[in-house]
Amino acid sequence: MASVSGVVADATYLVDCARVDCQRHLYSHKTPVYVETVVKAIADQMHVYTQFGSSRPYGVSLMYAGFDKVCGFQLYNSDPSGNFSAWKAYATGKNSVAAISTLKDDYVEGCSVKEGLVLAMKVLQKAMDTAMPEPKKFEIGVVTRHDK
């Protein structure tokens, strides 16, 4: 799963490239690709476009959330330069400084889903430009893992 801040057209292209890379790996190795491998591939592609004057760098920061059997649940962030890093909790985009500050103060490892949703709402409220946030402006999704 990926979230985007920046030029959405660039993000769409990069996400499509990631999907193709994942399918190639699945077809050739018969196993799902590791999350960090996907992040590295996209970050490398983003970095290449910063090296030459004849092409424009991608104007997007991406946050990747995923799960694999080796490392479990993971969260990564990459910026337009191609640098990426792993996080327990992070925010990107407009007013991300306020959101990150809130996460640093209030994030607790191993919190329940309900506590995580309350924290997410608190972070979104701090990051929004309005004094009175309206429920119709929020959209939250919860991703879970079910073993077969």
Image (cartoon, rainbow, N blue to C red):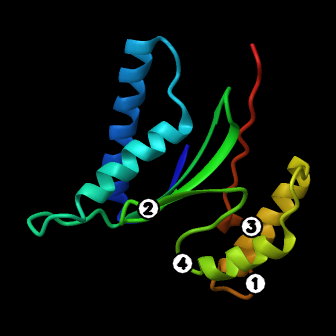
Disc 1 crowd rating (10 Å Cα; few below 14, some 14-19, many 20+) is few
User: Could you give the CA–CA distance between mark 4 and mark 2, rounded to whole angstroms?
Assistant: 19 Å
SS category of the residue bearing label 1: loop
Per the image, the residue denoted by label 1 is 132
User: Could you give the CA–CA distance between mark 3 and mark 4, rounded to whole angstroms?
Assistant: 19 Å
Observer-side mark, 2 or 3, equals 2
User: Could you give the CA–CA distance between mark 2 and mark 1, rounded to whole angstroms?
Assistant: 35 Å
Residue 115 location, x and y as percent?
90, 57
Residue 83 location, x and y as percent?
44, 61
The tag earlier along the polypeptide, 2 or 3, is 2
The three-letter code of the residue at mark 3 reads: Pro
Residue 124 location, x and y as percent?
71, 71
Per the image, the residue denoted by label 3 is 135
Q: Which mark is residue 92?
A: none
Q: Is residue 134 visible?
A: no
Per the image, the residue denoted by label 2 is 83
The tag earlier along the polypeptide, 1 or 4, is 4
User: Could you give the CA–CA distance between mark 1 and mark 4, rounded to whole angstroms?
Assistant: 18 Å
- Nearest the eye: 114 or 27: 27
SS category of the residue bearing label 2: loop
- Nearest the eye: 84 or 146: 84
The three-letter code of the residue at mark 4 reads: Lys
